[in-house]
Image (cartoon, rainbow, N blue to C red):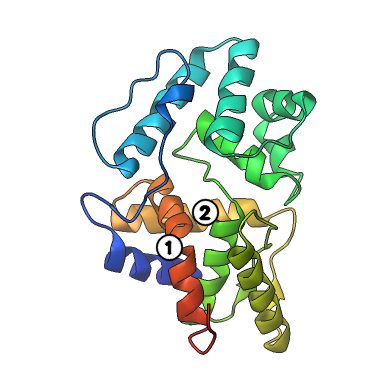
Amino acid sequence: MTLQEAIITYGKANLTETNDWYRWPVNPIFLPAGITLPIGSPYAQNTALKIQLSNLYSTADDHTKQEITRYYIVNWGGIRRNTEEKIRLYALDAPASLIARGSRGIASWSKALCIRNPSEYAIYDARVALSLNCLQITGPVSPPVGFPLLLGQNKLINLGSRMVLRHASVHSWAVARENRFYQQYNSILSSAAQFLDVKLYTLEMLLFAKTLELLKEAFPEEEF
């Protein structure tokens, strides 16, 4: 089984009309001007947010692009450690330049790219990274390729990442190339999304939401 096939299989088993497995809330207090959220589930509100922010970004001046990017990284994403210079870089630099950074700052700059074009660029963070690797254990995927694992704010996610690293080392996994893994990730998600007739970001949101379930499936003998 390939990773793309594993994602398709997992998507078939979990995607629904409401996608109520996604529970990340949108705080209406911090919404940028011009954004209106629909009444509905966190999934519906978050997808509407992505699309509206992307539309705003496409016609915005550089200052507003930075404000939109800051909102999505800091207020929505909860990543507060970036300097103003990094926010400016993530908001205005060419996608190829950001992607060339590899895993460095990817939890932030992939959010910036997602807002530029949510149909082409998916968010890559600690939860998504762990899910990608756990799916290769549960698939099982052959041959497995280790995607970079990120240090997150959740202790259980960080524990899971260490467990995956040990598993990958014991089973001699190949390692995804630092300068190519993000394109590979987007390509796999895009192909799987086309097969399932869903959006790229829907599969990214599924990977984000199901991380702890996938971790427990990958290591059923462990107590969490």
Instruction: From the image, tell me which residue sits under label 1.
Output: 210
Q: Quadrant of the N terminus?
A: bottom left
Disc 1: CA contacts within 10 A as few (<14), some (14-19) or many (>=20) = some
Instruction: From the image, tell me which residue sits under label 2.
Output: 187
Above or below, 103 relative to 56: below
| Picture residue at 70% right of the left edge, 76% below the top | 165
Q: Secondary structure at mark 1?
A: loop
Image coordinates for residue 86, horizontal then vertical, percent:
76, 30
Which amino acid lies under the numbered mark 2 shown in the image of this protein? Ser
Between discs 2 and 1, the one toward the N terminus: 2
Q: Which mark is residue 40?
A: none
Above or below, 147 relative to 219: above
Q: Secondary structure at mark 2?
A: helix
Comparing 142 with 126, the one in front is 126
Compared across the picture, whether 135 is left or right of 170 comes to left
| Picture residue at 57% right of the left edge, 38% below the top | 111
Above or below, 87 relative to 208: above
| Picture residue at 52% right of the left edge, 45% below the top | 122
Disc 2: CA contacts within 10 A as few (<14), some (14-19) or many (>=20) = some
Is any atom of residue 1 visible in this view?
no
Is any atom of residue 138 visible in this view?
yes
Cα distance in 3D space between marks 2 and 1: 20 Å
Which amino acid lies under the numbered mark 1 shown in the image of this protein? Lys
Q: Nearer the viewer, mark 2 or mark 1?
A: 1
Compared across the picture, whether 184 is left or right of 9 comes to right
Image coordinates for residue 72, horizontal then vertical, percent:
55, 31
Above or below, 64 relative to 206: above
| Picture residue at 71% right of the left edge, 85% below the top | 172
